[in-house]
Image (cartoon, rainbow, N blue to C red):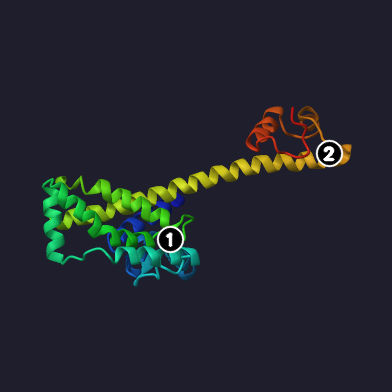
Amino acid sequence: MEKEILFADRLHELRNTAKKQANIVTKEQVEEAFAEFDFDKEKLDMVYEYLKKHNIGVGEPVDAEENLTGEEKDYLQMYLEELSALETVTGGQKEAFLLQAMAGEETAQERLISIFLPEVVDVAKLYTGQGVYLEDLIGEGNVALTMGVKMLGAFNDAKEAEGALIKMMMDAMEEYIAENAEADKKDKHMADKVNKVADAARELAEDYGRKVTVEELAAESKLSVKAIKEAIRLSGGKIEDLEND
């Protein structure tokens, strides 16, 4: 169990390292992270596959658009066309706006939002293929950006402030993915509960030749009355073979 926890920690550390390196890690960094596990090539390949699944490149960037659906590609093209109308700035101008935003100038903060909108897209593409829509990832990133430009006063220089904005976007997207995964897990758990009761009710109804009551199902199965009623509630009273009082 301790090794499993340590393995999970190493994966988490690698993902954090990748965050700071444009979502890329080197083979040397991977091998060093798992050196004490004495992994063979097959197990290291599994680690590389895990990293790729999370859009982390090993030695080179992954194709960030590989996991996009056709609908997402259409949305991305349309959104990028809208962003192309925004006025571009030079690196020096961006730095100047960052410094002004750090000083609390609201006009510069608003300007920074439009400057960084394309970067939100680039960050969002790194998180595709993880069970959420690209449009939602961009939305979460945009919210983080809008809030973040007002929080730059705590940083020492423009480069640090820019890095902080990117991290805020990434953190917001990761949190959204985690929340979505938890919601999916809960949905599956509820569906499993309903299906278990529905299957048992169907089998008993076939034996009886009619719908069955909660009490009959509880008596003839290992399901409790409480569990059956909970399943009825979760299904909105739509378990076909159960009498719904």
Give me the disc on residue 205.
2
Quadrant of image for the C terminus = top right
Tell me where residue 30 sits by quadrant. bottom left
Q: Is residue 152 left or right of residue 16?
A: left
* Secondary element type, mark 2: helix
Tell me the residue at 72%/33% (across/down). 223
Task: Return the x and y of residue 34 as percentages of the image width and height.
Answer: 38, 61
- Residue 134, image x, y percentages: 42, 58
Q: Quadrant of residue 7?
A: bottom left
* Residue 136 horizontal/vertical position (percent): 42, 53
Instruction: Check whether the beta carbons of the residues at disc 1 and disc 2 lie within 8 A of each other.
Output: no
Identify the residue at horizontal 41%, vertical 48% (top origin): 176
Which of the two discs, 1 and 2, labels the residue nearer the N terminus?
1
Tell me the element at label 1.
loop
State the residue at coordinates (63%, 36%). Answer: 234
For badge 1, the amino acid type reads: Thr
Q: How many marks on residues?
A: 2
Give the labeled residue for mark 1: 128
Query: Is residue 1 something that shows in the picture?
Result: no
Q: Amino acid at mark 2?
A: Ala
Disc 2: CA contacts within 10 A as few (<14), some (14-19) or many (>=20): some
Q: CA distance from mark 1 to mark 2?
A: 45 Å
Q: Is residue 148 above or below residue 25?
A: above
Drawn side of residue 236 relative to residue 73, left or right? right
Residue at the spot x=68%, y=30% of the render? Answer: 229
Viewer-closest of 169 and 23: 169
162 lies left or right of 205: left
Q: Vertical placement of 10 versus 237: above or below? A: below
